[in-house]
Amino acid sequence: MGLTGTALAIDAGNSKTDVALVTTDGRLLGTARGGPFQPQAVGADRAVDVLAPLIAAVLAQAGTASPVGHLAAYLANADLAAEEAALTAEISGRGWAHSVTVANDTFALLRAGLPDDGTRTGVAVVCGAGINCAGLGPDGATARFPAVGRISGDWGGGAYLADEALWHAARAEDGRGEPTALARALPAHFGCATMRELIEALHLRAVPDGRRHELTPVLFGVAAAGDPVARGIVARQAEEVVLLATVALDRLGLLGEPTPVILGGGVLAARHPLLHDRIASLLAERAPKAVPMVVTAPPVLGAALSALDRAGADATAYERVRRAWE
């Protein structure tokens, strides 16, 4: 039998999955990291299979077995109510815990950035491989977006930025678009002489699709050097981040209240000066009482904190679990 007073905390993202075992007094008993969590591509059952060896690993580190008391899973691609229900049923059926909660992974970032005492209201924007926003308001109200890609109005995230940079670079080289240093910098990153050569390499998979994300830092480097096209892409990303945040604040009736706006994910956690400063400037203009804060701790911390919330933990437990990651 599993140990009483323990919980599994899970943050499963588009690029990696983190699992931790914590006690309700805030001790960290084990951690494990695995690959991407993609139920939209492989189905709920095969996606949840990714969690099995990670859960086994953290239980082994603690010298215990399932079921634990509770499992808090914050999952990428759990964007719709139907997806959350399917994933909850699949995880519950594995017998890993006596009780299970499932939510979108943006809520883990939000919880990681909010205080452990007092009213927990705020908005989080995650910009990593993709982009999403979630908010908590008074009386448990939530603000969410479908966040399933272009068909739900999304713009941005690391993968999107890389493709946008490629689009502008290709058109610059063949004459359809404005000249930009991206046309030289992007192919050079992969050892190609021209965009035409890089396009062929990407199309024929000589450069795997999984490496496209490497172009996002290149884009920011070109923008920092002053290239107008690259700077325009970065400015558009800042606009989208602030738009998500202000719409969520407005929906929750918090636009005129001092409210944390938590920023996270690889693109925002990097604090690229052009992007970060533009976000701060736009927020100050459109939501002057918002309090922006970048969270660099892994979102699995938010999952662990939510497990402590459920257990009614004391202040010492919260301090202990935060120290484990921060």
Image (cartoon, rainbow, N blue to C red):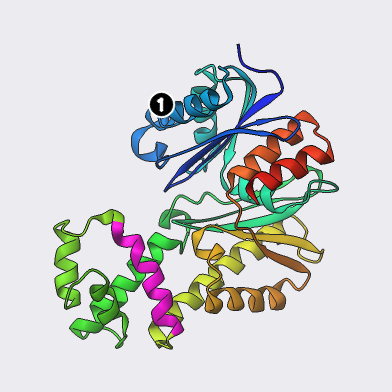
Residue that extends furthest to the right in the rendered view of this protein: 118
* Residue 283, quarter of the rendered image: bottom right
Q: How many numbered discs? A: 1
User: What's the residue at 50%, 18% (across, down)?
Assistant: 94
Residue that extends furthest to the top in the rendered view of this protein: 1
Predominant SS of the magenta segment: helix
In this rendering, would 210 be left or right of 318? Answer: left
**Type of residue at label 1?**
Asp
Q: Residues within 10 Å of mark 1 (few under 14, many from 20)?
A: some
The part of the chain drawn in magenta is 211-224
User: What's the residue at 41%, 57% (across, down)?
Assistant: 150
Is-magenta flag for residue 144? no
Q: Position of residue 51 (x, y in %)?
A: 46, 30
61 vs 168, nearest the viewer: 61
**Residue 76 visible (yes or no):** yes
Secondary structure found at label 1: helix
User: What's the residue at 80%, 66% (across, down)?
Assistant: 256
Q: Position of residue 312 (x, y in %)?
A: 81, 31
Is-magenta flag for residue 218? yes
User: What's the residue at 55%, 77% (across, down)?
Assistant: 273
Residue labelled with disc 1 = 45
Q: From the image, which quarter does the N terminus lie in?
A: top right
Q: Position of residue 222 (x, y in %)?
A: 39, 81
Above/below status of 305 relative to 188: above
In this rendering, would 3 be left or right of 15? Answer: right
**Residue 107 visible (yes or no):** no
